[in-house]
Amino acid sequence: GNTARDTSLESFMNRSHALITSVFFASLAAAVGFASFGGNSKPTMLVPVSSDVPAQKAPGGTKIAWETSFENAMTRAKKENKPIFINFSTDWCGVCKQMDENVYPMQNVVEASQKWVMVKIDGDKRADVARAYGVTGFPTLVFAHNSGKPLEMIPGYADPNELSQLLETNFEKNAKAS
């Protein structure tokens, strides 16, 4: 029905609002330069948590080993007993292209991805798989058990530090669920 779609849209909107708000406040803190003076009169910087360590590109062109077929990814996940990460995107999705250029090549993401079977699904070409996961927009990032059962779904953009953290926490969640 429409209620599932409405709640996922609502969750996407809340997430987008939270992201825009956090980006705004992080920018504001950076623009001001410092937030407070301690007793010793030295300025204290306010730094957003996600940019404590700027993400670096993986050395020597090391990349994520993407599966291009959902069926192959599921077979590999079961065989290798690894959880599966599904990146639902499309050719026309600008945010997906930004993630391809600025997130997936980063060393922390590439390293975290090695514990996973990573699959890229074109939501237009494989609308059946997108529908099965309740995908309503792109990108949608799905962290799933090797059975395909979702552990977590994230609609929209995730920066490199956020994505590597999500890969780690969902890997642990998967280990506990197994």
Image (cartoon, rainbow, N blue to C red):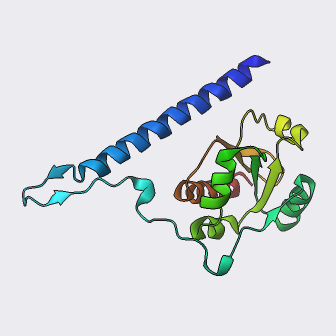
Quadrant housing residue 136? top right
Residue 127 in percent (x, y) is at: 87, 38
* Residue at 65 percent of width and 81 percent of height: 60
Left or right placement of residue 173 versus residue 131 in this view: left
Residue 148 in percent (x, y) is at: 82, 48
Residue placed furthest toward the bottom: 60
Residue placed furthest toward the top: 2
Up-down relation of residue 147 to residue 19 (above or below): below
User: Which quarter of the figure is the C terminus placed in?
Assistant: bottom right
* Count of marks placed on residues: 0
Residue 108 in percent (x, y) is at: 57, 67
Left or right placement of residue 178 versus residue 37 in this view: right
Quadrant housing residue 57? bottom right
Whether residue 103 is visible, yes or no, is: no
Residue 71 in percent (x, y) is at: 92, 54
* Residue at 73 percent of width and 23 percent of height: 4
Left or right placement of residue 60 versus residue 135 in this view: left
Up-down relation of residue 19 to residue 75 (above or below): above
Q: Nearer the viewer, residue 3 or 54?
A: 54
Quadrant housing residue 59? bottom right
User: Which quarter of the figure is the N terminus placed in?
Assistant: top right
Up-down relation of residue 129 to residue 48 (above or below): above
Whether residue 130 is visible, yes or no, is: yes
* Residue at 91 percent of width and 59 percent of height: 72
* Residue at 45 percent of width and 55 percent of height: 50
